Amino acid sequence: MKVEEVRKRYIDFFVKRGHVHIPSASIVPENDPTTLFTSSGMQPLVPYFMGLSHPEGKRLVNSQISFRTEDIEEIGDNRHTTFFEMLGNWSFGDYFKKEQLPWLFEFLTSHHEGLGLDSRKLFVTTFSGDEESGMGKDTESVGIWKSVNIADDHIFSYGARKNWWSRAGVPNKMPAGEIGGPDSEVFYDFGTPHDVKFGEKCHPNCDCGRFIEIGNSVFMQFIKQQDGSFKELPKKNVDFGGGLERLAAATRNNPDVFLIDVFDAARVILEKRSGKSYGSNTHVTHSFRIILDHIRAAAFLIASGIRPSNTEQGYVLRRLIRRSIREISKLDIQGAVLADIAEEFGAAYADAYPFVSKAVKVIRETLEKEERQFKKTLEHGLHELEKMGNHVDAFTLFTTYGFPVELTTEIAAERGVSVDLNAVQEQMEKHRALSRTGAAEKFAGGLADHAEETVRYHTAHHLLLRALQVVLGPGVHQRGSNITNERLRIDFSYGEKMTSEQKTEVERIVNEKIIEALPIIHIVMKKGEAEKLGAEREFGANYPEQVSVYSVGPKNATETDPRFSEAFSIEFCGGPHVRNTAELGTNGARFHILKEEASSSGVRRIKAVLE
Ligand SMILES: [Zn+2]
Ligand SMILES: [Zn+2]
């Protein structure tokens, strides 16, 4: 089924059931300085879950254009994209589980009104209950799934970390007054054989690639009381989020989202111009996927008013375009091609998002200009690099000619010339700005991750940055970060590979701070005050006059007596965080560095886990 058809059927289905179709909000949030991009359908609607009444009523439906910056470098598999559409339907204190789940099932399986998916390929997950808080199993959802004929062995239950939603994480972490509830995900079984390296038995949350999540219904059912107990909300909410591209892939029974129709015309252009076919080998497929993903996203961003620059959204756009150009060159395509590809995306979305095809002229000009400039930069820089012989000055190449440092490093390495990374490190700090992942992630329902683990990793991230400064010196600063519910990643300024002794020492310090059970203090203060305290700044961020600051320790610190001078770490940060570092050590978890590697010139990358 075509993407257009999936979207239309979904909207029609819910409009017929009393929902008002609201347009997609802009991909660039209008009044939210905490985040660069809209990353879910729920994000623009958060105030309405907090009690404000929506002018269009209690039942809404839409398809939201969304963009997630995390892991741009990791695009290339069969199911992840930076830009995507999220189908959403919402109940604000209106219908609940017994309407939502049968409707969803009907939409997924009905040939007449829905997608006609084979119900035997659907697997669902529900909340198994949570001993810590005494919150019971979501038997209601299980019963409803059974009543629509989902087989018993297709219904799985997971704990609060997988199937509970609240902005603060699992039930025990929720402060008084916070709302939350169980969620229920639907997975499609693509039939890919299970690989035992992911565990003995396969199940919906297995990472082997057999199951792909296609939607999640979040049930905002409870409110936490002062005494720690939970009360049913008088007005319960539903937040459903479904991945449009993945649903379209399910209708084709093929897990590769890059084979859905919206990519067809652009893919054909790439095949013609390169003389290579998609799927012919893994390198070609990888390059194709990066270009297709990045240029589709770039077309929407440019049409939304973003232009390539060196800050914030413009920097993300520039990265998308430049990464595409490098992949184009790997495919040996001569001459400009990006604008032609983008134009095909304008056409593919002409009905649903006419603002893209209407902007085709400016999209074309922007891409052609950036492509021309970057190619000139590459040629010119290459010429200068040749002239430098054995004394390659990567910083001058970058500042004078705009030649990317990572490219200098690559080319110099090919020629056996080494670049002095330390020399460029300090200067580079002033010249680079990396995108931030939005604080809005913490609000994300739908396909978003599970907040509690992410919050723990965020706090571990603060401990790690400070430990790196202790071990490697005060010149270490954050250059990028990415936190999921499974691991944290930090990019930081440092010019050399860390020794194993240094890594062990960093791990030791972080674990020591976890064992010391230090309080985390959150204070909103004037920017100047935070600067005086030496609070660590987030790289590339612009701060308003009032800023939010988080400090870790000392042991007797409180919000009224924060004892900043004795704190282990102080950062400008929007949060959220755990309340005590001891929470990072639950169930005997310890902090481990998985990997330390070069990210770009003068910047190292660490991936770490709490396990
Ligand atoms: Zn599996
Ligand atoms: Zn932070």
Image (cartoon, rainbow, N blue to C red):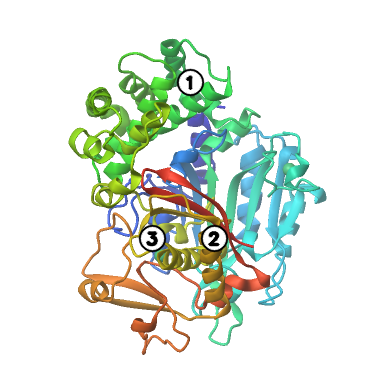
The quadrant of the rendered image in which ligand 2 is seen is: bottom left
Residue 214 x/y as whole percent: 60, 43
Tell me the residue that label 1 is attached to: 264
- In the image shown, does 566 or 125 lie closer to the viewer? 566
Residue 499 in view of the camera: yes
Tell me the residue that label 3 is attached to: 54
Residue 171 x/y as whole percent: 60, 72
Location of residue 542 (image quadrant) = bottom left
Identify the amino acid type marked 1. Answer: Asp
Residue 40 in view of the camera: no
User: Which quadrant of the rendered structure holds the N terminus?
Assistant: top right
Give above or below for 488 relative to 386.
below
Identify the amino acid type marked 2. Answer: Glu
Residues at marks 3 and 1, CA–CA distance in whole angstroms: 38 Å
Q: Secondary structure at mark 2?
A: helix
Identify the amino acid type marked 3. Answer: His
Location of residue 405 (image quadrant) = top left
Would you call the spot at circle 3 few (<14 residues within 10 Å), some (14-19), or many (20 or more)?
some
Give above or below for 542 relative to 431.
below
Residue 423 x/y as whole percent: 29, 47
- Which labelled disc corresponds to residue 501? 2
Q: Residue at x 64, y 51 (%)?
A: 185
Residue 215 x/y as whole percent: 59, 47
Answer left or right for 146 relative to 487.
Answer: right
First along the sequence among labels 3 and 2: 3
Q: Secondary structure at mark 1?
A: helix
Would you call the spot at circle 2 few (<14 residues within 10 Å), some (14-19), or many (20 or more)?
few
